[in-house]
Amino acid sequence: MKNKNKYTVFVDDNFHYMDESERYEEGSYDTAEQALEVCRRIARRSLRDLYEEGMTPAKLHTQWLFFGEDPFISGGERVLFSARDYITDELCAEVIAERTGPKVP
């Protein structure tokens, strides 16, 4: 039986929307903040993995909506994390900047 005090991070696949057989468990964490950090890390990693040279933030965002990983938290006290709210065009622009590096004049 799972410890109810743990926060478990699960990850759905947007490409297989509502197909729970495609879901995987990332891990269980003692605190909500640890679980939230893992969700943020998974979301950013998914954006980095989906990025292709020349993509705009809006295109990267759309790619994530169709093909990205969508982490969420279960267990413990109710902790809400919505990758759909977390991933914005602004975050996509940050990830693109990380991937492409600073522009040299």
Image (tube, rainbow, N blue to C red):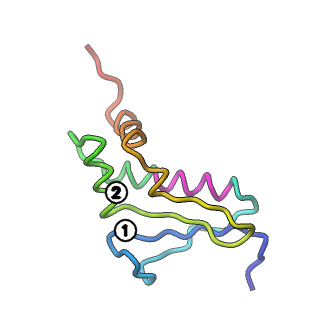
Q: Which residue is mark 2?
A: 64
Prevailing secondary structure class for the magenta stretch in the rendered image: helix
Q: Which residues are magenta?
A: 34-43
Which residue lies most toward the left here? 54
Q: Which residue is mark 1?
A: 14
38 is within the stretch colored magenta? yes
Residue 93 image-quadrant placement: top left
**Kind of residue sitting beneath label 2:** Trp
Q: Which badge, 2 or 1, comes first in the chain's sequence?
A: 1
Count of number-bearing discs:
2
> Judging from the image, what secondary structure is the residue with disc 2 in?
helix
> Judging from the image, what secondary structure is the residue with disc 1 in?
helix
Residue 52 - label: none
**Circles 2, 1 touching at the beta carbon (< 8 Å):** yes
Q: x, y (%) of residue 29?
A: 70, 63
Q: Is residue 49 left or right of residue 83?
A: left
Q: Residue at x 45, y 49 (%)?
A: 44
